[in-house]
Image: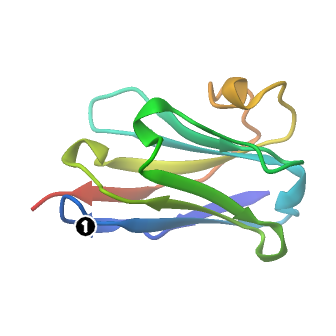
Amino acid sequence: LQLTESGGGLVQPGGSLKLSCTASGSPLQYYGIGWFRQAPGKEREAVSCISSHDDSIYYVDFAKGRFTSARNNAENTAYLQMNSLKPEDTAVYYCAAVLAYTSLEKMCLGAHVNTWGKGTLVTVSS
């Protein structure tokens, strides 16, 4: 399984971006999907995690109400819609595929990721 993120770029504060995570080499439907980000000089942190087998989605606190995750197994793609972006959202955003997990919260710890994408840069600046 390979993952490729796209959709990053430069956006003004208050703007929106939609990131995509496209899978190849294996069907994405069997994997939980995590969105993570890493800002310059900071540790990687989770954004959201999507269940592989139902409609459950977990968001970390800063993402609640602003970010929306989704997956389309038919398209082998996951999405992260980001609204009301702030300068502190500036980071490289990664998607990750997780085959086995016990909870979405634990998936979002990032410890059992099977595959990482290479990331897409999001810059929020005026």
Q: Looking at the image, which is closer to me, 83 or 8?
A: 83
Give x and y (percent) for residue 4. 61, 64
Give x and y (percent) for residue 29. 87, 58
Q: Which residue is drawn at 39% across and 67% down?
A: 17
Give x and y (percent) for residue 49. 66, 41
Residue positioned most to the bottom: 75
The image quadrant where one finds the N terminus is bottom right
Q: Which residue is drawn at 84% across and 75% down?
A: 74
Q: Looking at the image, which is closer to me, 106 or 15?
A: 15
Residue positioned most to the front: 65
Q: Residue at x 32, y 39 (%)?
A: 39
Is residue 118 something that shows in the picture? no
**Quarter where residue 109 is shown:** top right
Q: In this view, does 55 lie above or below 101?
A: below
Is residue 106 something that shows in the picture? yes
Give x and y (percent) for residue 34. 64, 43
Side (left or right) of 28 relative to 49: right
Residue identifier under label 1 = 10
